[in-house]
Structure formats: structure tokens, C-alpha cells
Amino acid sequence: MKQDMTKSVQKPRKKRALGNEELFLHLMILPGMIMLAIFVFAPFVGSLMAFEKYVPAKGILGSEWVWFDNFKFIFSLPDSKQVFMNTLIIAFAKLILNIIIPVTFAIMLNEIRVSICKRTFQTIVYLPHFLSWVVLATVVSNMFSLSGPFNAVITALGGDPIQFMSDNNWFRKVIIGTDVWKEFGYNSVVYLAALTGISPDLYEAASIDGANRFKQTIHITVPALLPTVILMTALNLGNILNAGFDQIFNLYNPLVYETADIIDTYVYRIGMVERQYSIGAAVGLLKSVISFILILGANKCAKKTTGSGIF
Amino acid sequence: MKKMKPGTLVSQIIIWIVIILLTLSCLLPLLNMVAISLSGSEAVAANEVGFLPKDLNVSAYKKLLGDAQFWKSTWISVERVVLGTLINMFFTVTMAYPLSKSRKRFRAREVYMKLVIFAMLFTSGIIPLFMVVSHLHLTNTIWALVLPGAVPVFNVILLINFFKGVPEALDEAARIDGAGPITILLRVYLPVSLPALATVALFAIVGHWNDYFSGLIYMTKASRYPLQTYIQQLTVDLTQVTDANQLKQLAAMNTRTFNAAKIVVSTIPLLLIYPFLQKYFVSGIVIGAVKE
């Protein structure tokens, strides 16, 4: 009632003020939208070169249109299937492990009651997330080199040293493992936040009923984390074609292309190094379209199962 | 203190051991890097350096002081962080404020929002973006490092969510006092959003400092490389070396202690802001999780 009254009294004045304010908001958002237009939407138009035989001197409009020839060419390359499979395998393994390990870590860390220790552990495990792969690539190749600590342990146990960084049987495992290592602390943050949201009453009731800590974890903690797990899975599912360019680019070498060359590294080599712009753009466009569809799908699934989506 | 059941004690011990091992796994490789940078090259070559320096000396750091390109690249990175973060903050605030208004206040909101979400989800890949940047003649300038990512879409969404949580009453009160929209933004929204602004600023700083890739593709002259690109080029695998000049450079400098020193120095700025980062990023993630 009261609200209605003020509304009707103020109506004429308020409407004019609203117009001014809206104009101001439009003006305010304009510079940002211009930047998006130049650096996000214009490149999107530039992707048309995927359907051309692009020659830089002739430009986007002047180059010869070849429609789907570039895509046909990509599918005819023997490397393509390999690159696509490498991407899927690496990204999928990372997706699964980057949920299981952080969830386990969060649950375990939550059991530690000495808060100063807990905070110290957190401070240290979050750190690798903030270091670049340029820096960590040196650290990782140092650890896995022939003279590094892993090989020292292997030889001490009587085994033969392994060329982790150039052996196709091992390199992919190193890539997946070190990615999980870099991110598990940071990824555990959301689960730790979810854990603090669980009511202590639940645990109390369960312990009165005679459930031990382990049973409480299985029957209370895990189900309480499930919505977050589903949401994070959905979020990451859209990234299934992003196997981690920065990491692989800084660690790989031609010896392990067979198992570790992914779409993004492939696009980089074809497009930026060999300067076959159209082919590179075509692979990039294909990847973007598939990812976009996946994200939309994943978001829908997340919304259906947990009630909240990514956007 | 309550007496623990034997089962609980065992599981507590296992948990502590696992957590400590995981924590050490994050710490020791980094300590090893520091130790290498402070050790004698013979000890490093003989692989005798663990987590403490052997034949302690600072010659690698002394050599680093005389490496002109390292400092030039560091300066470019510093310039980039300052300029890039200011630009990012400007666009984050000017995008997030209008988009945090309700549809009633800002009728075009939904259209803009759709464009922003599209920009977040659909990236056209590096090649078309590279074309745009080179057509604008930005290559080899600092602008190539800061303009393509000028609007950090993820941070915009984070700040939208934060602005939406600002009580309507504050806004109304300022309006009644006769404050205009600019005053309301500067005097009401920004002061109450300081934690969120700190979060997005820190994300921007870390992002700019750590990025090597835009330096790699947009800078054709090695003298224009930001620090991470410079380091990336040094540690690059010998098989990827394309010209003789680069090879000579590598042969002259590719000593492990020297490279380790570069990496350690390049990490120091991050360690300096790390306490602030840690204070804010958790809340940042939690705000980010409150979705549109």
C-alpha cells in the first residue's frame, strides 16, 4: 500500500530522472562494449578466414572463398584424429582427477582441528596455482629430469632411469599429474567453503546414533558436497577441449607430439609458426563451436540437477 | 580434552601424514629451485643440491644484475602490470555498474548481458585475434599486451554479483540526498565494494604478471619481451630453436643456476602480494560462485 502511494506521488519526477540515469548507464558501458567489439566480436568475424584461402595481402574480403575445403583438409590429415584424441584423453583425465583429489583433500583438511596448522597447509598448497607454467615448467622438468629426484628414487630402488619428459608412455601422465598438483589446493577452496556450510547438528545427531567419523563422512559430508561437485563438473565439461595449452606448450617437445599434442598447440604451430592462417583458424573455429555447444549443454544439465547454473 | 577412540586416532594419523605429504609436495620443488639458484654450478651439475644450497654463493644473482635484457623485460612487465591493471579496473567497474542495475532501471541490460556472456563463452581463437591486433598496428607496443584483454569478462561478472548485493537502501538514501549517478557510484558503491575490487585487482595483477603468450605472439623483437616471455624463451627446448642467434644466446646463458635465479627473482613480486591474494581470493571465488 505504502509503496503504491509513494510511487503514484513521485511518478512524473521519477520517470524523467530514470531517463537521465539510463542515458548515463548507456554512456558508461559504451567504452567497454567498444573494446569487446574490437577484440572479441571483430575476431569472431575474422574467423570467416576459415572458409577462405586467406592471403594477408588481400585481406579478409579480398581472399578467395573455398568454403569447407579447409575443414575437409583438416579431417584428411592423419594428425587430426591423434590431436583430437590426445586433447580428449588429457582433458578428461584432468577433469576427473581435478575433482576427486581436491574433494578428498578438502574433506581430510577439514578433519584437522589445529587451526594454525590448517591455515599453514592451505597457504602452501594454494601457492602453485598463482605461479605461471613458464616458471613451473622449469620446476617440473627439473623434478622429472634424468638426474632429478624421481629418477634418483627409481635408481635407488634398483630400477632403470626413465626419460619422463620424452617418453610417450610417461609424458601424458606427467602432464596430468603435475596439473593436478598445481591446482588441487586452489580447486579445494570451493569444497572447503561448502563444508563450512554443513550444519554441525547433523554430525551431532549422527554421532548420537552411533555413527563414527568415517560413516559420518560417507553419509553426511559426501552428499552435502554433491551439488558443488556436479556444478564444478558441469563448469569443467565445457572445457573438455581445453587440455591446458600453457602447461603443454611449456613442457612438450617433438618427441612426445604423438601423445601430448593437443588442439591448441596444433593450432599454434600451424597458424602462428607455419603461418597457414586459414587452416589454423578453421581448427580454432571448430573447437570454439564445439566448446560453446558443450558449455550451453553442461549449463542446462547443472541447472536441472542443482538449480543453479554457470550463467 | 575428550579421549580418542583408537580408530579415530589411526585415521587422524593417516590424515595428518597425507596432508603433510601433499603440502611438502607443493613446497619442496620450489625450495629446490631456490637452493639451485644459490649453489655452485659444479654441485648443481653433479646433482648434489637438494633443498638446501650447496657451496652457497650468489654469483648467479650477481650475473643477473648485469643482464640488461632481464631488467628491460622486468621493466616492461612492471609497466604492463600497472597499465593493464588500471585499464582492467576501469572497464570492470564501468561494465559491472550498469549491468548490476535491475531491468527496470536499465532496460537495455539484458541485451548487454547477453553480449557479455557470449564474449565469455565464445572465443574465436588466437589467429583471428592476432590478425586484429596486427591490423591495428599494435604489435611491438605495450598496447598489444594490455588492450586485447582490456575487459576481463569473468571479473566483470564477479563484480556484478557483488554490486547486486549492495543494499538498495544505500542507493535510495544517496538519491534522496540529491546525489547524481556518478556520485552514487564513487561514494556509495566503490567504498562498500573494496574487498571485491581488491580481489579483481589482484586477479588482474597476477594475470598480467604471469602472461607470457601475448608477449610471444605480439612482440616480434626479443628486446620487447615481457619477463615471462623472456624466461619462456630461455628455457625453451633446444629442439624448438629456430635460428643460430638464439642458439648462441642459449649456449651462453643456459646454465641451471642462472636460470633458477631468474625464475626465483621473477616469482618474488608474486610472493610479496601473496598474503593479500590469499586474504581476498577465497571470498572472490565464493562471490563468483553466486551466479547470474
Image (tube, coloured by chain):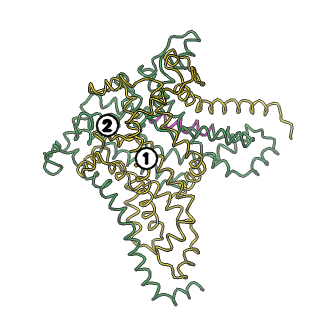
Chain colours: A green, B yellow
Q: Is residue B103 above or below residue A46?
A: below
Q: Magenta part of the protein: which range? A: A91-104
Residue B161 vs residue A76, the one in the foreground: B161
Up-down: is B93 above or below B131?
below
Where is residue A139 drawn, in percent x and y? 50, 29
Please give the name of the residue rendered at 33% of the width and 51% of the height, measured from the top-left corner: B143
Measured as percent of width and height from the top left, residue B167 is found at 58, 70
Q: Earlier in the sequence, mark 2 or mark 1?
A: 1
Residue type at the position of mark 2? Ala
Give B285 or A292, whichever is nearer the viewer: B285
Which disc number belongs to residue B222?
A: 2
Label 2 marks a residue whose chain is B
Image coordinates of residue A206 in percent, x first then y, are 77, 45
What type is the residue that disc 1 sits on? Val
How far separated are the C-alphas under marks 2 and 1?
17 Å
| Residue in the picture at 20% in, 45% down | A51
